[in-house]
Amino acid sequence: MKCIVGLGNPGNKYKQTRHNIGFMVIDELLERNHWSLNKSKFKGDYSMEMFEGEKVILLKPQTYMNLSGESIRPLMDYYNVDLEDVLVIYDDLDLSTGKIRLRQKGGHGGHNGVRSTIDQLGTKEFKRIRLGVGRPISPIPVVDYVLGSFPKEEHEDVIISIKNAADASISWLEGKSFIEVMNEYNN
């Protein structure tokens, strides 16, 4: 069983913000496969589906970003999901908008949702897809920036990064090793 987690904040207020790009990738995967988030438990909304003969869980924690791990860990424990079968998708200030980077491990880089995930999982070694949202150009607090919407001129790049992250996720679900997927999508 594999589990793909998109990080974000619940509610319409945050729906199109930079911090919710992880949720946007989950939405893309749901739409492509005609699935829906039909379960609410473990402080999250999720869907359990079959993909090429294997169970897959898609999760959107509803804890707000800073407590994301409090949704991920209980779900993993309940369904007995191995750490090697978890993929976490989130926004990254250090990548320009439109870029994605896949990694098998790493620190939190100041991202509180990832910090919470590391704290709850007890390790930095989990698969991840980081989607670039860029850094603010003007002197704006980072929290205001990530909770802001993408400007119109970035929409095309955002859509491309969401589709690429969804494509990479599907490649992993189809059975490619994560290293193979990294080699393909990190170029």
Image: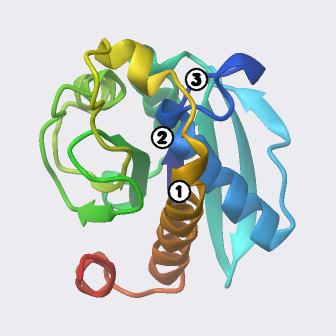
Q: Earlier in the sequence, mark 3 or mark 2?
A: 3
Residue 185 sits in quarter: bottom left
- For label 2, the SS is helix
Q: Earlier in the sequence, mark 1 or mark 2?
A: 2
Instruction: Tell me, for residue 158, which label it has, or none.
Output: 1
x, y percentage for residue 11? 73, 19
Q: Residue at x 55, y 77 (%)?
A: 170
Residue 1 showing in the rendered view: no
Label 3: how many residues lie within 10 Å, few (<14), some (14-19) or many (20+)? Answer: many
Viewer-nearest of labels 3 and 1? 1
Looking at the picture, which amino acid does disc 3 mark? Asn
Q: Residue at x 30, y 76 (%)?
A: 178
x, y percentage for residue 182? 26, 77
Q: Which residue is mark 2?
A: 76
Q: Which residue is mark 3?
A: 9
The answer for how far apart the CA atoms under marks 3 and 2 are is 20 Å
Viewer-nearest of labels 1 and 2? 1
Quadrant housing the C terminus: bottom left
Marks 1 & 2, CB-CB < 8 Å contact: no
The answer for how far apart the CA atoms under marks 1 and 2 are is 29 Å
x, y percentage for residue 82? 38, 54
Q: Residue at x 40, y 23 (%)?
A: 145
Asked if 171 appears above or below 36 in the picture, the reply is below
**Quick check: 41 left or right of 178?**
right
Looking at the picture, which amino acid does disc 1 mark? Val
Q: Earlier in the sequence, mark 3 or mark 1?
A: 3
